[in-house]
Amino acid sequence: MKVERNHRISCSMPSIYLISAVQFHRRFRSTVIQAGRKYPNLDECYQKNSSKFWDNFYKLHKNKFFKDRHYLEKDWGQYFSDDAHSPNGKVVLEVGCGAGNTIFPLVAAYPKIYVQACDISPHAVALVKSHLEFREDRVNAFVCDVTADNLLKRINPSSVDVITLIFMLSAVSPYKMPGILQNIKRVLKPDGYVLLRDYAVGDFAQVMLEAKNQMIGESFYVRGDGTCSFYFSEDFLSTLFLQAGFKTVNISTYCKQIKNRHKNITMDRRWIRAVFKWE
């Protein structure tokens, strides 16, 4: 199968809130000290507390931080539309659903689609259920840590047509990524697809995190609020999915320069987009 690789322009994303490592440890000193005693490795320390950090994130920002992802219909509409295999509508699993910025554009654009949606943050799931457009016959939202919780306890095996990972995989340690792919594969139908969009190596946010000495692993960083971010290369991502039994349909790196006139700086933003198929 031919793998498409290209470089295109993507839409802008909100800037990432950064503070120095010193400020972070002052703000969360008790949490870091307690976790550090139990988990000497920084990577493990932050990952073990990721549910708390992401819950604090959504309590603070609610549904205002990320914009609704209406570009999904344009970029990947063919994967969400009805076909001969799913004439009554596709079943989509949104992993890391946050406040529903992927869910509700999809539900609005595709009347037959049914969305299984999970997130590590209980507050994020509560935001989804409180959304004005939330309907239980269209969306099943639940709390799940896909690095540890078996999805089969909530979703039937081989029942999902499409899985979306939108700025989700980067939030976990690269050591836990293979386990996540095995977990989602249990509920994906044969010939099902995984659609991914995430941060790419060389992104402005990575450069800023590097400058602030907030790296806790190779290409893996902690932000000022305790949440983490990994930055993908095309080779790393395609190899990761290949080793999990997926084929790469296409993979792209998007680049865009964004001018911050207030601070008089130019930000080179980079995102990666990919489609994988389980055969």
Image: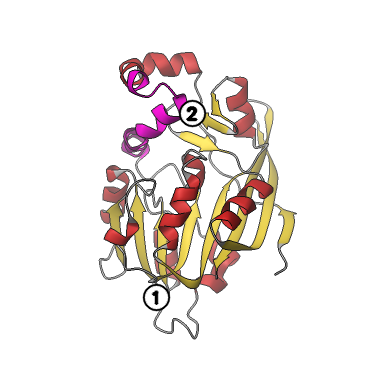
Instruction: Answer whether labels 1 and 2 touch (C-beta < 8 Å).
Output: no
- Where is residue 180? Give x, y as percent: 44, 51
The boundaries of the magenta stretch are 35-61
Is residue 152 visible in the rendered image? The answer is: yes
Give the residue type at disc 2. Answer: Arg
Main SS, magenta residues: helix
**Which residue is labeled 2 in the image?**
223
The correct choice, above or below, for 115 with respect to 43 in the image is: below
> Mark 1 and mark 2: span between their CA atoms?
38 Å
For the point 53% across and 56% down, which residue is it? 244
Q: Secondary structure at mark 2?
A: loop
Callout 1, which amino acid?
Pro
* Coordinates of residue 22 in the picture (x, y in percent): 47, 13
- In the picture, the quarter occupied by the C terminus is bottom right
Crowding near pointer 1: few (<14 within 10 Å), some, many (20+)? few
Residue 147 position (above or below residue 242):
above
- Label 1 or label 2, whichever comes before in sequence order: 1
